[in-house]
Amino acid sequence: MAGIESASKQRKRVVVICGGIAGSLAAKLLQFDADVTLIDLKEYFEITWASLRSMVEPSVAERTVINHKNYFKKGHVVTSPSVNITETDVMTADGDVIGY
């Protein structure tokens, strides 16, 4: 019975690939309910549609780039492209294998 209880208390493992709009939101919302790893090429989320406005109003530019660690406090960020996805793992170009 103890094995069943400990298995039910284990957190789910989730790997989110790409930290764009959907990926960043998914990672942010799931971080308190699962062990989440976000894999992205960059360490930040860029609000690309604000780029044009930042050209005419430079103060906007600093608000168009948000570091993943600023909103994603409880998860892990891996900065590398994913190169292979299996039923249980994601492999990155850096050689990391992240299970889920």
Image (tube, rainbow, N blue to C red):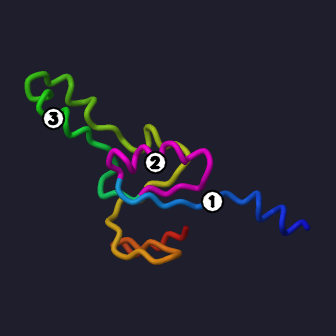
Amino acid type assigned to the residue bearing label 1 in the image:
Lys
Give the mark, 3 or 2, whose residue is nearer the N terminus. 2
Give the mark, 2 or 1, whose residue is nearer the N terminus. 1
Q: Nearer the viewer, mark 3 or mark 2?
A: 2
- Disc 3 element: helix
> Label 2 belongs to which residue?
26
**For residue 41, above or below residue 83:** above
Location of residue 48 by image quarter: top left
> Label 1 belongs to which residue?
12
Residue at x 19%, y 22% (from the top left corner):
59
Examine the structure image and report whether residue 40 is included in the region drawn in magenta.
no
Disc 2, disc 1: CB below 8 Å?
A: no
Quick check: 18 left or right of 4?
Answer: left
Disc 3, disc 2: CB below 8 Å?
A: no
Q: CA distance from mark 2 to mark 1?
A: 14 Å
- Disc 1 element: strand
Dot label at residue 44: none
> Label 3 belongs to which residue?
51
The furthest residue to the left:
56
Q: CA distance from mark 3 to mark 2?
A: 23 Å
Amino acid type assigned to the residue bearing label 3 in the image:
Ser
Q: Please provide the residue range marked out in magenta.
A: 19-38
Amino acid type assigned to the residue bearing label 2 in the image:
Ala
List x then y, in percent, for residue 66: 33, 38
List x then y, in percent, for residue 23: 39, 50
